[in-house]
């Protein structure tokens, strides 16, 4: 199966090792890609684990899992990585009524103890 993150690699050679805790994402972009794949699979547990611990109280694993399940995640486009800890991306998906949507965000990541975490995102038009 092709990886949902649109890397052009197989899921087994791309995001699966991160989802199975066999490897840690080496860059903020790799973590962003693996998080998109976690919505597409879906894997709410991974999404919680890769959120910076100080911000986890703002999220709910069940809601993240459900958001992945009710939408059809079709494409990830990395727009730019302006700094080592920022990734601008567009996530394309069909919502529960099958209407095409685009989630455009500039995400902030933080590296703690050699592991990257999602911190927050600014929605862009």
Image (cartoon, helix red, strand yellow):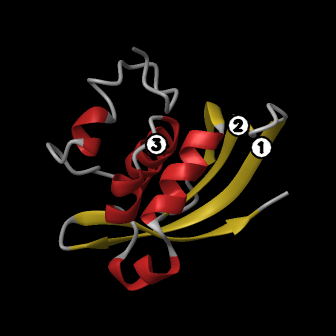
1 or 3: mark nearer the eye = 1
Q: With 106 as the anchor, is 99 left or right in this view?
A: right
Q: Earlier in the sequence, mark 2 or mark 3?
A: 3
**Residue 106 lies in quadrant:** bottom right
86 or 56: which is nearer to us? Answer: 56
Q: Earlier in the sequence, mark 1 or mark 2?
A: 2
Q: Earlier in the sequence, mark 1 or mark 3?
A: 3
Q: With 1 as the anchor, is 17 left or right in this view?
A: left
Residue 8 position within the rendered picture, expressed as x and y whole percent measured from the top left: 46, 19
Work out whether 70 lies above or below 103: above
How many angstroms separate mark 1 from mark 3 (CA)?
Answer: 16 Å
Residue 77 position within the rendered picture, expressed as x and y whole percent measured from the top left: 63, 37
The N terminus: image quadrant: top left
How many angstroms separate mark 2 from mark 3 (CA)?
Answer: 13 Å
Work out whether 3 lies above or below 89: above
Q: With 6 as the anchor, is 72 left or right in this view?
A: right
Which residue in the structure is indicated by mark 3? 33
Residue 37 position within the rendered picture, expressed as x and y whole percent measured from the top left: 46, 38
Label 1 SS? strand
The C terminus: image quadrant: bottom right
Tell which residue pokes out farthest to the top in this image. 1
The residue shown at (17%, 45%) is 23
* Label 2: how many Cα within 10 Å (few below 14, some 14–19, many 20+): some
Q: Are marks 1 and 2 in contact (CB under 8 Å)?
A: yes
Residue 104 position within the rendered picture, expressed as x and y whole percent measured from the top left: 73, 52
Which residue in the structure is indicated by mark 2? 92
Which residue in the structure is indicated by mark 1? 102
How many angstroms separate mark 1 from mark 2 (CA)?
Answer: 5 Å
């Amino acid at each position: 199966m092709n990886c949902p993150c649109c890397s052009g690699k197989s899921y087994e050679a791309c995001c699966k090792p991160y989802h199975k805790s066999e490897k840690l994402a080496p860059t903020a972009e790799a973590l962003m890609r693996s998080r998109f794949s976690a919505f597409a699979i879906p894997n709410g547990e991974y999404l919680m684990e890769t959120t910076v611990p100080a911000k986890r109280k703002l999220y709910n694993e069940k809601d993240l899992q459900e958001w992945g399940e009710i939408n059809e995640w079709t494409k990830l486009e990395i727009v730019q990585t302006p700094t080592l800890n920022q990734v601008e991306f567009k996530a394309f998906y069909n919502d529960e009524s099958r209407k095409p949507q685009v989630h455009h965000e500039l995400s902030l990541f933080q590296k703690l103890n050699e592991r990257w975490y999602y911190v927050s995102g600014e929605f862009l038009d």
